[in-house]
Amino acid sequence: MEMFDLSLIWAVIIAFSVIMYVLMDGFDLGLGILFPFAPDEDARDVMMNSVAPVWDGNETWLVLGGTGLIAAFPLVYTILLPALYLGVFLMLAGLIFRGVAFEFRFKSKRTRGWWNAAFAGGSFVAAFAQGCVVGAYIQGFETADRVYTGGAFDWLTPFSILTGLGLVVGYTLLGATWLVLKSEGHVREWARGLIPKLLIGVLAVFVIVSLWTPWIDPGVFDRWFDHMQVIWLLPFAALLCAVGIYVATRRRREGLAFLLTLGLFIFTYLGLLVSRWPYVIPPDYTLWDAASAPESQFFLLIGVLFVVPIILTYTAWSYWVFRGKVRVGEGYH
Amino acid sequence: MALDPILLSRLQFAFVVSFHAIFPVFTIGLASYVAVLQGLFVATGNTVWDRLGLFWTKIFAVVFGMGVVSGIVMAFQFGTNWSNFAQMAANFIGPMLSYEVVTAFFLEAGFLGVLLFGRHRVSPAVHFFAALMVAVGTFISAFWILATNSWMQTPQGYEIREGMVHVTSWIEAIFNPSFPYRFAHMAMAAFLTGGFVVCGVSAWFLLRRRDVEAHKRALSMTMWLLLILTPLQAWIGDEHGLNTLEHQPMKIAAMEGNWETESNVPLLLFALPDRDLQANRVEIGIPNGASLILRHDPDGVVPGLDQIDRAQQPPVWITFYSFRVMVALGLLMIAFAVAGLVLRKGGRVYHSRWFLRGLQGMSLAPFVAVVAGWVVTETGRSPWLIYGVLDYADAITPSLSGGMVLFTLLGYIAVYAVIFIAGVYYLCKVINQGLDEHDDTEELDSHDRPARPMSAAHVPFDDARDDRAPNRS
């Protein structure tokens, strides 16, 4: 066991689970946020049908990440969850409402308006809460002796509200490029028209957060302005993706626009990771401080290494099966 | 009034876990029943088994979906409200809970899809195999969760270094002393839950003369099963109690309302326990009963609460009466199973209105019994979260205030109320639709693998029965 740095392996697995979750649940949360603004009920059917076969699988990454944390980095679990107590509750409540609405909207007529509202509201709250978590994470947590000692609302600051709104706009952009890819006719034109506006919103938040982040903490400042010049490639790549999304949308390269939006998320995510690496609970604890016992990490690793490839294969296969456009009135149900 | 975060957190955990537990306990039993039905279809070729299988699979799908949704919250409760416990025990409970997720993932990835949507895409034998694997999978999930809970009741196979549990033997920790009993007791409870719900729903159809032949079969086979399982459960429960006597004697003392360690202890049927008096105000019991049950000897010594300090005593009222509710319902279940056997003569089991109405009511009994049983075992170990190792006060999240917990407790109650009402309402619609409303187009039109369990039930939420879901038009 000593031959491998199990904690490092686990850090990679969990970082991977998180970005998988963000990318995959991101576009269906984005569709939920767009829901109230859709031109008509047909468009809403198309929007829901475009993610109906896959959204459930998307959320399983969240549960895997959550339980993986307690097994591999219990300190992260036991400091983050108390610190984000109310935010976590809002996120879970949002996700639950949205999940139930997903099931029952298709099956209802009279109460459909209520399920629409639950779907949109749940998606917005969940996305905003997740964005606040990102902001709170960059700020760091007040701890003493491996226990969270801050208050109930430390996670809610101007900075974290900004990142919360940023993630809402980001998910919406992801949802819009997904919808352009998966729809046609008036639904597609509506979604396409949204992309430039959303792109401006995303870039505005991106710039403010990027300028603000180094001043939050001296450690982050040093990381960006001291040595490691190579990490400047990450925000540069993210900006390049943003330009690409605009160009690809104008030239009607739908698949490319969606992939570049994924790229925008990935590079931003990596940028956030390097800001704090190897601290998993900024500003005090590194991933090795937070790790569980090697025998526990190893015990679970066996199962995860067996199952994750199966999940990935199965996910890829289900996206392949459900590829192509969703048409109005063509139900998956 | 100051809000106590410990008490509120215990209430919150009790609420979310009880609410969640009623779904898995049902799906575990139902999955096995569906597998049996599909197996009978393969073995006999009689389509009535397949029709029953389809009907119960739809119900399984809805309940499974609700279980998944309510279960997400559980993965976060340990960190939000019991972070010191999570930190201390992470080396054991972390891998256990993760393996449960991994198992569920694996199950959902493959066999569930085939069971729910593959009825006409694969052969009956393959479909049966998928049903069997789903049933096995639900048991594997329960295995990890119950191993974790049992370890918290009777911990072993670990050592504590620097304030953290370190597992010294996974086998010893997983197969801890109370695990085999708890697992058997819970598995049987799941079968009984599935069995009584099937009987109750069959009775409902028989009373309305709908699909009489099919539901007669379902009722008959399930009543035979219950005739064997209800007494078996009583025996397993007794064994579980003896195991508890050995490892958690104070839980037994609270269950029996026994304050003093002595011989010739009566089996109390009714009592008014009083913590201040350290005795029962009033008690009605069967002489020597508790000594006989627990020690198999009228002169046997039964431990009493006087063995520990007053502050360490579990709440007697809750433990005592929850236990009696569970046992009373268990005896009622045995009575119904035996009554069913007697009524078979002349086929009255299918016609007797009082019996069928009673069965309808009994479909709720296992749920109440399961929750009551969990209240017994969880309250009875008080004040320990890990028995003898970590108590509530040391396990709670230090930064938590009473107001925060109250807010989320009310929030979870509100969220779960909506899910529960919508879910049960929809479930009633699915049941009311009955056996004959299905047609082949209900299978997925052009796709292979939907992940969402509830989409297996194609019943409108709020429209007239003949009104198809609008997006299918």
Image (cartoon, coloured by chain):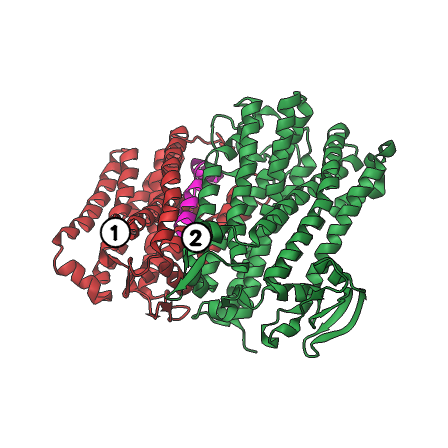
Chain colours: A red, B green
SS class of the residue under badge 2? loop
| Residue A288 visible to the viewer | yes
Subunit under mark 1: A
Q: Which residue is mark 2?
A: B169
Quarter of image, res B430 = top right
Q: Secondary structure at mark 1?
A: helix
- Name the kind of residue labelled 2 in the image: Ser
Which residues, given as a range, are shown in magenta?
A37-66
Residue at left offset 55%, top offset 41%:
B138
Q: Main secondary structure of the magenta part?
A: helix
Q: Nearer the viewer, residue A263 or B141?
A: B141
Q: Nearer the viewer, residue B458 or B160?
A: B160
Left or right of residue B216: residue B158: left
Instruction: Give the residue at x 64% y 61%.
Output: B245
Location of residue B333 in the rendering, given as x and y in whole percent from the top left corner: 75, 47
Magenta region includes residue B103: no
Q: Are marks 2 and 1 on the same chain?
A: no
Assess whether mark 1 and mark 2 are in contact (beta carbons under 8 angstroms): no
Q: Position of residue B277 (x, y in %)?
A: 71, 79
* Left or right of A241 in this view: B365: right
Query: Is A285 placed left or right of B346 in the picture?
Result: left
**At 84% from the left edge and 40% from the top edge, which residue is drawn?**
B353
How many numbered markers are drawn?
2
Residue B116 versus residue B284 in the image, above or below: above
Please name whichever residue, A186 or B432, is drawn nearer the observer in this view of the structure.
Answer: B432
Q: Which mark is residue A203?
A: 1
- Percent across and percent down for residue A89 are 46, 59
Quick check: B174 above or below A250? below
Q: Label 2: chain?
A: B
Cα separation, mark 2 vs mark 1, equals: 53 Å
